[in-house]
Amino acid sequence: MSKPVYQGSRWDLFYELIRTDFILRYHNSILGFIWVLLKPFLIFAILVTVFSLVFKIQDRLYPLNLLLGLLLYSYFAEATLRGITSLAEKSTIILKVNFPKVIAILTSVVNSFISFFFGFLAFLGFWFWVKPDGSLLNLPLFLLLVLILTILIIGLNFFLSLVYTKLKDLLSIWEVLLQLLFYLSPIIYPLSYVPAKYQTIFLLNPMAIIITQSQAVLITGRGIDWQLVSYALILSVLILMLGWLFFQNQIKKINDNF
């Protein structure tokens, strides 16, 4: 017996899944949505204290660079962690109703983007207080970098969500890889601290490019490196295309994995 097909608008379903996930995420949480803002800023406060007081970093832009790096990394980490379990968490719906499964993937990314957006609004408050050398006229360039990051996240989630339905250990493995990515990205240290001969290797990491270029256009005012951005865009689009092909091929077998 075939599953009933969802008869409503895909946009209505998309909205309902986003709303439901958002509500469930903060259900029984005392701080609720405030925690979205508090978490990166508490980590930021700890790291600024350690590196400014213990390691004597005097750069006035260091806290702002650190905060922006943390926000971008947190968006990537949260969106991929939620993306990994996005299909498994909705298995009861998937098994009963026939609807576009890609909506479950996009829902996890949108909810993570909402958290990032409000965190960025708080970042702007610090930006006006510090008054860095960058300009808010470069916001369109920053949004382009965020778009590239989002494309990368969606592409990875196409792979991760399906593999997780077969291999539950993937979540633990990915958490370890995210910690490795954190230290391989110029978040708590500037790229200039990396020996020049290794910087090219570091910049093979698209997260390193997105973070350094975001800092350049919004904080330091150095201007954007289009060669690096083009590489990050091409790599992200390639991962998205391969992920979509993999998703389209494997999603037909999803019922066998639950």
Image: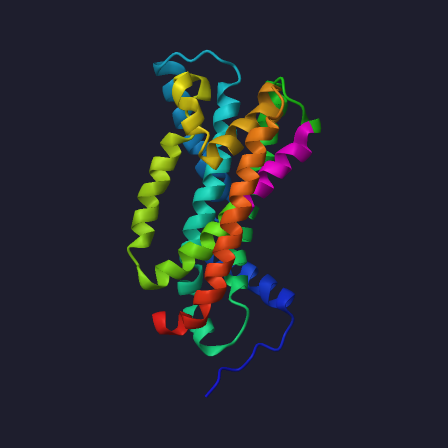
**Magenta span main SS:** helix
The answer to whether residue 118 is seen in the rendering is no
Q: Position of residue 106 (x, y in %)?
A: 54, 57
As drawn, the residue found furthest toward the right would be 137
As drawn, the residue found furthest toward the bottom would be 1
Work out which quarter of the rendered image holds the N terminus and state it: bottom left
Question: Closest to the observer: 158 or 201?
Answer: 201
In magenta stretch: residue 148: yes
Image height of 151 relative to 99, above or below: above
The answer to whether residue 51 is seen in the rendering is yes
Q: Position of residue 62 (x, y in %)?
A: 49, 19
Please give the name of the residue rendered at 39% of the width and 17% of the height, measured from the top-left corner.
Answer: 195
In magenta, the rendered stretch is 138-151
Q: Position of residue 69 (x, y in %)?
A: 49, 31
Image height of 159 relative to 198, above or below: below
Image height of 31 relative to 127, above or below: below
In magenta stretch: residue 37: no
Please give the name of the residue rendered at 53% of the width and 24% of the height, measured from the top-left corner.
Answer: 64
The colouring scheme, among rainbow, by chain, secondary structure or one colour, is rainbow
Work out which quarter of the rendered image holds the C terminus and state it: bottom left
Please give the name of the residue rendered at 62% of the width and 68% of the height, measured from the top-left corner.
Answer: 10
Question: Closest to the observer: 36 or 114?
Answer: 114
Does residue 226 appear left or right of residue 174 in this picture?
Answer: right
Q: Position of residue 138 (x, y in %)?
A: 67, 28
Total marks drawn? 0
Q: Quadrant of residue 7?
A: bottom right
